[in-house]
Amino acid sequence: MRWLIDMRNSDWLLPMVAVIILFSIIFGIAFGLNAIMVNEQITKYNDGVCKACGGHYVYEQAVGHMYGTSYLYRCDGCDAILEMHFLPETK
Ligand SMILES: [Zn+2]
């Protein structure tokens, strides 16, 4: 009886640990990619100053997607469109 309980415990434990490790890796990658994406967009937004012409990005509209919302900014100098996946801080 004792042996049975032990067997059941270890049968339980190993897949559990494997699943926890797997989820940690998946979430780690997801958060890592998100951080990279946010950094990239902040770099592109460049405090609202267009790198191509020195103009300013003006908020135009929000676009809803299946997976979230995009915020479109248009440069008042060269009409370049910048798509952000979050609202950058407005000063
Ligand atoms: Zn521009």
Image (tube, grey):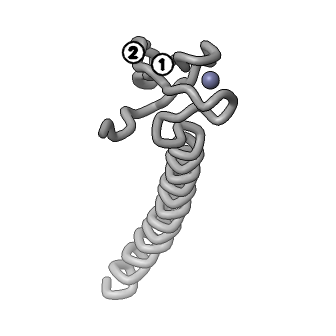
Q: Report crowding for label 2: few under 14, some 14 to 19, many 20 or more residues within 10 A (C-alpha).
A: some
Q: Secondary structure at mark 2?
A: strand
Q: Secondary structure at mark 1?
A: strand
Q: Position of residue 18 (x, y in %)?
A: 52, 67
> Residue 9 lies in what quarter of the image?
bottom left
Position of residue 60 relative to residue 83, above or below, is above
Q: CA distance from mark 2 to mark 1?
A: 6 Å
Q: Position of residue 74 (x, y in %)?
A: 52, 17
Mark number displayed over residue 12 = none
Q: At label 2, which amino acid type do we have?
A: Ala
> Residue 63 lies in what quarter of the image?
top left
Q: Report crowding for label 1: few under 14, some 14 to 19, many 20 or more residues within 10 A (C-alpha).
A: some
Q: Quadrant of the N terminus?
A: bottom left
* Residue drawn at x 38%, y 83% as measured from the top left: 6
Q: Residue furthest right?
A: 52
- Total numbered circles: 2
Tell me which image quadrant ligand 1 sits in: top right
Nearest the viewer among 44 and 70 is 44
* Residue drawn at x 42%, y 13% as measured from the top left: 60
Q: Position of residue 69 (x, y in %)?
A: 41, 22
Q: Reading the chain from its start, which is encountered first: label 2 or label 1?
A: 2
Q: At label 1, which amino acid type do we have?
A: Leu
Q: Position of residue 76 (x, y in %)?
A: 52, 16
Q: Quadrant of the C terminus?
A: top left
Nearest the viewer among 15 and 52 is 52
* Residue drawn at x 66%, y 27% as measured from the top left: 53
Mark number displayed over residue 62 = 2
Mark number displayed over residue 72 = 1
Nearest the viewer among 71 and 46 is 46
Position of residue 41 relative to residue 85, above or below, is below
Please say if the residues under marks 2 and 1 sit with CB atoms less than 8 Å apart: yes
